[in-house]
Image (cartoon, rainbow, N blue to C red):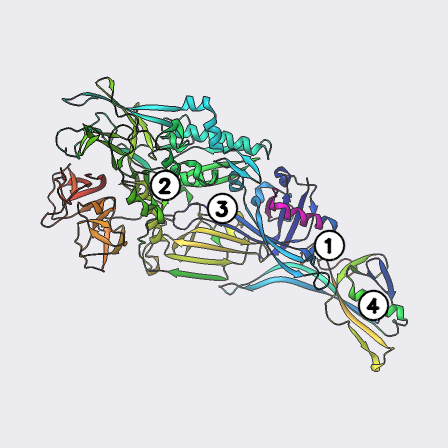
Amino acid sequence: MPAYRQILQYQEDGIGLVTAEMIVSDTFADLFIPAGFIDVDIFDFNDSVKDLEEATGVQKEDEFEFSMHAAKVSTADESACFAFILQSESQIRWVATFLHETANYTSADRDSMEFVGKIRPSASGTDFIWHGNQWETDPHPHREWKLKAQSFGAAVLDSINLETETIEGVSVTGIINQIIADSAWVSANIVDKQMFIGDIVGTESVELWILRLVNFNSAMEKLRVLAEARIQETIPGFSLVFNSAYSGFKFETLDYAYRIGGGSSADLGTYYKISGSPSGYANDVKIFDANSINSPFVSWFLFDPDFEDNWQKGNNDAYAFKGRKNLTTLLYKIANNFGFYLSFKYISNGIEVTFSPSASIVSEPVYIKDAVKGSINIDAVEKSVNKKYKGHAHHLAVEGADCYDVKFENDAMMATTSKDMVADKANSELLPLTTSPTFVSYFEDRGGFIWQRDNYVRTYPHNARVLIDGGLASHDSNVFTHTSIYIYQGGYIYPASSVGAKVDGVETWFPKIADLLNAIQVRGDQNYKTKYEIEAPYLCGFSLNSNGSSPSWKNLKLGSLITLDAVDYAVYSIKRNYQEHRTNIKIVNVSKFAFIEQAVTPLPYSIPSFGTLPGESVAVPDSYGIAGEQVYAFNVAVIGDDGKYYNAQDIQEHHHKFVGFFLNNALTGENVNIKEYGDVTNPAWHWTVGLPVWVRVGETTSNVSQSPLTAKDGSHVLVLCVGVAISSNTIQIKLIRDRKYA
Amino acid sequence: MIYLKYGTTAMSFIELDWKSKPELNSISGDTLRGITFEHINNARRNYDITISADAIDTQAKYDFLESFFCNGARAVSFDGTNYIDVVMKSGDFPVDWLENARDLPQVKFTLRAKNPGITRATGEQLMNSSGL
């Protein structure tokens, strides 16, 4: 088990002797044994890179780049080391770098570790010399190889496959497959949870159960145990720790869940309220704590799309967690879903995976000794119209309070909405989990295989078992995957219907997680428009004190605050070049107006975790775009297939196209601002407070109304409820219903 | 007297002259504030050596010097015991012929210490107690 070491020393101006150590071994523990190394001199240390994703603040994988040159090989040990490194193509080669700032240091001291990871199984090389005669086929080139190492945490978890795969000719069971195969665990953890029980006034007694749920934290704990055992096969004694944390987001549930149809087409906006349900309650969600009552629940079909041989299993695969590349990817996706910042921290023979609310990225101020380069870019303050994130409840319903129709029981004929969702998938990233209180409506059975398509017998939540007056309703087999986060509250389970985050100290609710994440993207664009890149000719010239005392490379971290000319910036990229002894830093201004020297607020990383965002008023648009026709302020806006914005109408073509409210008039081709979430106020409105607001056409001055479409009327088929009047002239934007008559 | 060696082949010469001077390898520049910084990577010793035609009095000695030039694993010693690993600049063999006489070759070259010194990369300790 060789462990090779190379050291690089230099005298840093103002610091003294600095020693960079690079240690390579095939045994992880050997990286940290401070003796017995075989010293070599074949490597060039290049860059060590640590980055946050600019828009979201999510940490990317740390990387360390180095090269090795065959011409430097002059001893048998160096030759062996050279070959040893190249074996990283097929074998694990761990690498750690240490940066010591004192003349007397302890080799492989964890406190001075700058990077630890695994050499990637890919490399690029350049030949400098060929040997032998012309035409010979074995020139034995002298080659310089460039290699990269990925950070330890990601490297270890990258190797954990979720789905069973054939890796290097060997079938490796995915850890999710391992859970599925653990029938005892499945039996003990897959549960049906009661959603509602009580009397619907004047009609009947109803009991609702949401079927085939799993405590999300219990499932993650099971994944953790299996992943830890897998890693221990390579690294004995390894510990994988998941630190529990409260989400950066809060979740709300609906207060209605069930509707009885009958007669002519009913008012689709009238649903029976569940007395005592926690609507509007800002539910905290805690992740990685299997014992917490704040654990979310999710559909078990996300783990096992083939569970119970359900009749939609072919369509479940696209939403299955197994589809993620590996455990690292899954953790990143989940972190994003719950408003977390994901970090991997090396601990003694193990790693801690921590989800932190995004605001905690920001750390203490740091002072830079000096710089040799500084370049600043200030772009126009604009907002992107791109929507990176989309959510689907499943293949028939989008995220939000969507509704889909079925004929009867498990008959496969449905009034699908999937056609509308194809475009979503093309250019967007689908979220693994959503806020989707999806409903399913059953057509009236007229007998003889005829169903009354504009009349619904009942409407109730997806994946629900319905007991009416004590008996099992006949509509109980419609059970398949669903991406909603379910909140367990007061002994009952509810699908999350909206997600909240504080904006400028004010709780703001978004109907979908995708909306919130896209809003983060937009805000990120605002705040990152002023970018500053600094090259400091030091590795160690960073102090926590304004007098420059105790400088150290360790003081500079992702998220460090740097103040320059009274403007606060946050570090989002660090690149240390060992060979050139320099540090390249990318920092971002938190204020979009910093370049005109207005007062700024030190608020880096504008993730809307509670209490961290700059001001927001109802007049501030959330996006902008190009009007596809003449549009009017305070009309409801939809987005067309051409990416332009139109006045919403209650027609089939506008199903699932709701965006928000226009904030200004615009002619065709002109820019128009759009309010997508929060409240919108129009002095000209006179609403009845507390009632929902619907998209209608035929109104004289507006396309919004408090009178819903109650029956199909020619081309008027869309029942689109876009918010609730919270005052006579203010609407709280909230997508409550987006469905159409068949 | 100097002792030259490549691989395991060694030979001594009475040099006409040799001088030693340090070579410093550093990264320096001016910051945006105009302050100069200098990071010292390493310092090593160079040896300028001239071997006169008198000392190259046999074909074997001349051949050795050519082989010394063309082979790796070179070393130089000033006491015949303690050898210092050295490298040479590539290029033409550094020979001049005095008075353009073919039998009066004078070889003049610079040997560069392979290792930067006892205290590696430490500018303050450039020489040992012998001044080498």
Label 3: chain letter? A
Return the residue at label 4: B65
Residue A333, position as x, y percentages in the image: 41, 40
Residue A166, position as x, y percentages in the image: 54, 38
The residue lying furthest to the bottom in this view is: B99
Label 1: chain letter? A
Return the residue at label 1: A74
In the rendered image, the quadrant that contains the C terminus of chain A is top left
Q: Specify the amino acid type for callout 1.
A: Ser
Q: Does residue A728 show up magenta in the picture?
A: no
Image check: A636 left or right of A69?
A: left
Between the residue at mark 4 and the residue at mark 3, the CA separation in whole angstroms equals: 54 Å
Mark closest to the chain's N terminus, 3 or 1: 3
Return the residue at label 3: A61
Label 4: chain letter? B
Q: Are marks 1 and 2 on the same chain?
A: yes
Q: Does residue A81 show up magenta in the picture?
A: yes
Pair 2/3: label in front = 2
**Residue A431, label in figure:** 2
In the rendered image, the quadrant that contains the N terminus of chain A is top right
Look at the numbered disc 2 and give the secondary structure of its residue: loop
Image check: A700 left or right of A438?
A: left
Between the residue at mark 1 and the residue at mark 4, the CA separation in whole angstroms equals: 23 Å
